[in-house]
Image: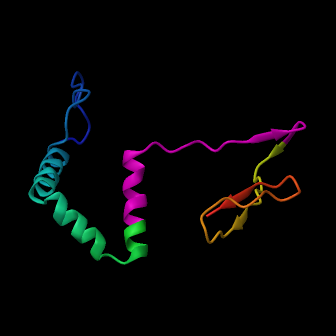
Amino acid sequence: MSTQFEKGNPGKPKGAKNKVTTEIREKFDQLLQSVTAEQMAADLLALKPAERLNLIMGLAEYITPKLARTQMQFDNQAILNPVFKINVIHSKDGFTAPPLANSEKDVVL
């Protein structure tokens, strides 16, 4: 038996589904259907914070689109790593503190 296609045999039709992949996807779908949203939330909260963050970041790739890197132009010079300075002002009463005399922006938390 030859491992090459015989003349005139086009091979697998374009768009044909792989049987093993189809079976694995069906089993995975059954697994997801068998777990409630409450159980998923409980399992997620049972993870350590770092593990939880890694899982969420890994799943986010399949849910939200990745954003392209942007490049800023200033006086015809590219800025690849812009630096922003933020002054954090802690306010006991929750009101915004008056801005500083310079041009920096203040952020009240």
Residue 56 colored magenta? yes
The image position of residue 12, as x and y in percent, is: 22, 31
Residue nearest the viewer, comparing 97 with 49: 97
Residue nearest the viewer, comparing 91 with 63: 91
Q: Which residue lies at the image location 73% right of the left edge and 42% below the top edge? A: 71
Q: Which residue lies at the image location 61% right of the left edge and 68% below the top edge? A: 93
Left or right of 60: which side holds 41? left
Query: Which range is magenta?
Result: 54-77
Q: Which residue lies at the image location 62% right of the left edge and 72% below the top edge? A: 92
Residue nearest the viewer, comparing 108 with 11: 108
Left or right of 33: which side holds 68? right
The image position of residue 8, as x and y in percent, is: 22, 21
The image position of residue 21, as x and y in percent, is: 20, 47
Determine which quarter of the picture holds residue 107: bottom right
Determine which quarter of the picture holds residue 97: bottom right
Q: Which residue lies at the image location 42% right of the left edge and 50% below the top edge? A: 61
Residue 92 colored magenta? no
